[in-house]
Amino acid sequence: MPTTARPTLALTAGLAALLLAGCGGGGGSAGGGSGFAGAVPDRAQGAATSSPTPAPPPTGPYVALGDSYTAGLDIPPQTGEPGACRRSGVNYPSLVAKALSLAPGQFTDVSCSSARTGDLTGPQKVADGTNRAQLDALTADTRLVTLGIGGNDAGFTEVVTECAKENLVDLVKGVITDGGDRSGKSPCRDHYAAGNGTDEVQRRVDAAGERLGRVLQEIGKRAPKAKVYVVGYPGLLPADPASCRPVLGNAVAAADLGFLVEKEQQLNGMLRQRAEAAGAVFVDLAQPSAGHDMCAGEDKRWVEPPLPRRGMAPIHPNAQGQEAAAGVVVKAIKG
């Protein structure tokens, strides 16, 4: 095997190993420059006296629900119990609560890494204990809810891992047979393709949507006076796969990077549709995170690449991404 192929093979194998070993997150999910962070002023009322007075933005009690993209996987300081949920004290819910000047008793964060929609209505077993059913934190007094979920239901982390495996096999074969030419190849898309024009990932996203719809109905029953915000996932990859070459090398074929972008767009589209159908607000993180994906420079990215900075979780938001997400959520709340 030519020595020029070794770095790419090592990166691909490392991507698969890291995802298999430690990504509890979601899929996805979900991230800006720090210019998005902080409270955003209320919209000024119209000058006409006949204009209706805008409803005040919701405050507390505030309950945060979600998976690792909400929890802030591995971002210090890690707080709360059980520890294996790996919540950060500077995740976006904590920063939103701070921006809204909520007292400690007015904010409850029950997000947990690896959570699926089923863990909202039932207890979630983690390494050091059990995270109670997240919806149990809701009461009739709850006035604000943020929800970031769905990536694990859709198996997005597993999809990324499988893409890494499929591309590793294809790369090894290609080095032997055609010198490593990846043009026109999409082994990951081929793996998930179905004869009816859909694919397995789309089927998972659709099924996750059905479960999410039921969860949103349950939130409405338990917290009927709460304003609910469904928070999407930040962009993991750029629209132009070629810009990932400095970070990912030739580890994943360009067509498969495009496939992953397409699947994340599909996931966020489902979240938007379900939120709007339930009368909730969808908070889009994909558009604000453009240019801040895992392939952006270290000072710009909101999501860490497969080989992250020391102590950070691969394919998950970093502290800058959580700060940016908080700003976008606060802007949605403030109007």
Image (cartoon, rainbow, N blue to C red):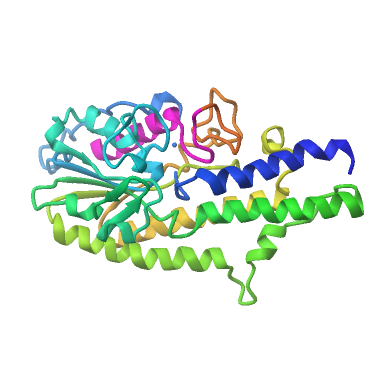
Q: Residue 62 lies in magenta, yes or no?
A: no
From what the image shows, is residue 75 above or below residue 306? above
Query: Residue at horizontal 24%, vertical 36%?
Result: 334
Locate the N terminus and report the quarter of the image it occupies: top right
Q: Nearer the viewer, residue 80 or 254?
A: 80
Query: Residue at horizontal 65%, vertical 49%?
Result: 257
Which stretch is magenta? 311-335
Locate the C terminus and report the quarter of the image it occupies: top left
In which image quadrant can residue 211 be found?
bottom left
Q: Residue 313 lies in magenta, yes or no?
A: yes
Q: Position of residue 105 (x, y in %)?
A: 12, 35
From what the image shows, is residue 260 above or below residue 8? below
Q: Position of residue 126 (x, y in %)?
A: 35, 50
In which image quadrant can residue 173 be found?
bottom right
- The reply to whether residue 241 is visible in this rendering is no
Q: Is residue 225 found left or right of 195 in the rendered image?
A: left
Q: Main secondary structure of the magenta part?
A: helix
In which image quadrant can residue 128 be found?
top left
Farthest residue to the front: give it: 128
- The reply to whether residue 65 is visible in this rendering is yes
Q: Is residue 44 found left or right of 166 in the rendered image?
A: left
Q: Position of residue 59 (x, y in %)?
A: 16, 38
Query: Residue at horizontal 52%, vertical 65%?
Result: 202
